[in-house]
């Protein structure tokens, strides 16, 4: 594929559409940027070469015109000296240099157009490269944000779970201690009717609080 064909394909490409369809947009945009950078280096080198060629052709054309002018002077001198034959030969030499200058002028024009095309492509490619780098920056930023968010969510989930377990264990220990204390208080004597009803009410409250805590603990696993 020629350099201009590659440049046209890159310039005419829709970066956003390509990234939207890609399975791995970050990888694709990185490859696109590398391709643009390589193409940009190549096209700049070609442009520099064409600019050097343009100067060379310009110098050679000016030299041909100078030689044509010299031979025109020689033809004039020959006429002044009555040497028409030499004047004719001088004019033939002049024509040869003029024709060469005219051919160089056409070549120079073509080279100028080529340099202009290179320069236009370089500017458009630089713009396209800038857009691709901005897309890459946004993608990387989004990726990092997603990773940070995932880490935060995982951290919160771990914190919630561990905190719930800890509170559950503390509550179980509290219940065990309360039961032990209750057993010691009642040990050795028969509880009164009032004590039995109070114990039933206390047990109901504890059981209800324990059930609520278990429900809160199991809620995240159900989501």
Image (cartoon, helix red, strand yellow):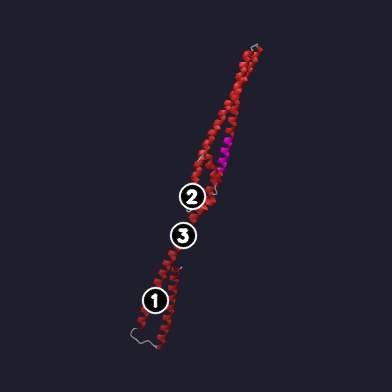
Relative placement, left or right, of 78 versus 207 is right
Please identify the dominant SS of the magenta region.
helix
Calculate the distance from the C-alpha at mark 2 to the C-alpha at mark 3: 24 Å
Furthest-left residue in view?
188
Of the two numbered discs 2 and 3 in the rendering, the one whose residue sits closer to the viewer:
2
Crowding at dot 2, Cα within 10 Å, few <14 / some 14-19 / many 20+, comes out as some
N-term mark: 2 or 3: 2
Q: Tag 3's secondary structure?
A: helix
Relative placement, left or right, of 154 versus 67 is left
- Residue 113 image-quadrant placement: top right
N-term mark: 2 or 1: 2
Q: Position of residue 200 (x, y in %)?
A: 41, 83
Residue holding disc 3:
150
Relative placement, left or right, of 111 versus 164 is right
Q: Tag 2's secondary structure?
A: helix
Q: Is residue 182 above or below residue 34?
A: below
Residue at horizontal 53%, vertical 34%? Answer: 48
Q: Position of residue 74 (x, y in %)?
A: 62, 16
Question: Which segment did they paint magenta?
Answer: 113-124
Residue holding disc 2:
28
Q: Position of residue 218 (x, y in %)?
A: 43, 70
N-term mark: 3 or 1: 3
Of the two numbered discs 3 and 1 in the rendering, the one whose residue sits closer to the viewer:
3
Q: Tag 1's secondary structure?
A: helix
């Amino acid at each position: 594929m020629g350099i201009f064909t590659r440049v046209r394909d890159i310039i005419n490409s829709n970066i956003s559409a390509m990234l939207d369809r890609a399975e791995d947009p970050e990888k694709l945009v990185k490859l696109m940027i590398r391709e643009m950078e390589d193409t940009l280096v190549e096209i700049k080198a070609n442009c520099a070469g064409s600019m050097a060629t343009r100067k060379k052709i310009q110098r050679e054309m000016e030299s041909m015109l100078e030689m044509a002018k010299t031979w025109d002077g020689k033809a004039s001198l020959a006429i002044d000296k009555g040497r028409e034959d030499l004047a004719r030969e001088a004019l033939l030499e002049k024509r040869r240099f003029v024709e060469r200058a005219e051919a160089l002028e056409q070549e120079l024009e073509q080279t100028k157009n080529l340099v202009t095309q290179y320069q236009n492509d370089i500017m458009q490619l630089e713009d396209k490269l800038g857009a691709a780098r901005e897309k890459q920056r946004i993608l990387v930023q989004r990726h990092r944000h997603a990773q940070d968010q995932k880490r935060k969510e995982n951290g919160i989930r771990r914190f919630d779970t561990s905190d719930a377990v800890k509170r559950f264990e503390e509550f179980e220990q509290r219940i065990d201690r309360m039961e032990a204390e209750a057993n010691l208080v009642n040990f050795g004597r028969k509880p009164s009717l009032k004590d039995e009803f109070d114990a039933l009410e206390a047990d109901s409250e504890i059981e209800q609080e324990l059930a609520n805590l278990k429900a809160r603990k199991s809620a995240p696993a159900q989501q």
